[in-house]
Amino acid sequence: QVQLVESGGGSVQAGGSLRLSCAASGYTNSGYCMGWFRQYPGKEREGVATIWSAGGNTYYATSVKGRFTISQDNAKNTLYLQMNSLKPEDTAMYYCAAGGSWSVVGGCRIDFVYWGQGTQVTVSS
């Protein structure tokens, strides 16, 4: 049974940093994509960043490019999201996702199979 457990969320002031972690169990990230998504209250989940395990190719949403960094430690089966220069509009529930497929043309597809329970990030101004 695959489990994704996020941690590292919390409250921080604008300009601060947080590092989210996603520990995967029962899952081998070989050739698949993992990613981070976030959801605002009453809104649909949106992609933040994805990474292809085999090639390390990354994708970032425009709103976080240059501030967030996605990375993976395959030995620990853990995904990370380093978030710097946080803004109040980054306040959301953040979810880890795994098992997404990869396309040479389009990169990671948004067809993730496994999802974590989420971790709250709150940025105050």
Image (cartoon, grey):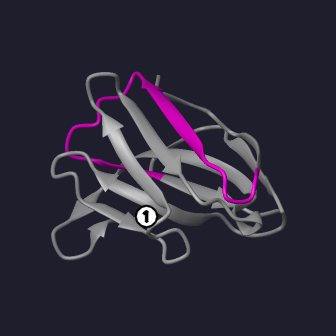
Q: Nearer the viewer, residue 80 or 85?
A: 85
Which residue is tagged 1? 110
**Could you say which quadrant of the image residue 49 lies in?**
bottom left
Q: Secondary structure at mark 1?
A: loop
Q: Is residue 93 above or below residue 79?
A: below
* Residue at 48% over, 72% down: 61
Position of the C terminus by quadrant: bottom right
Numbered disc total: 1
Q: Residue extending furthest front? A: 15
Q: Is residue 2 above or below residue 55?
A: above
Q: Position of residue 71 (x, y in %)?
A: 35, 45
* Residue at 64% over, 58% down: 38
Q: Nearer the viewer, residue 39 or 114?
A: 39
Q: Nearer the viewer, residue 109 or 69?
A: 69
Q: Is residue 26 above or below residue 33?
A: above
Q: Position of residue 103 (x, y in %)?
A: 21, 67
Q: Which residues are magenta?
A: 13-35
Question: Horizontal placement of 12 versus 95: left or right?
Answer: right
Q: Position of residue 47 (x, y in %)?
A: 53, 65
Q: Position of residue 9 (x, y in %)?
A: 68, 39
Question: Horizontal placement of 47 versus 112: left or right?
Answer: right
Question: Horizontal placement of 89 versus 99: left or right?
Answer: right
Q: Is residue 98 above or below residue 85?
A: above
Judge whether residue 22 is colored magenta: yes
Judge whether residue 119 is colored magenta: no
* Residue at 45% over, 47% down: 113
Q: Amino acid at mark 1?
A: Ile
Mark 1 is surrounded, within 10 Å at the Cα level, by few (under 14), some (14 to 19) or many (20 or more) other residues, namely some
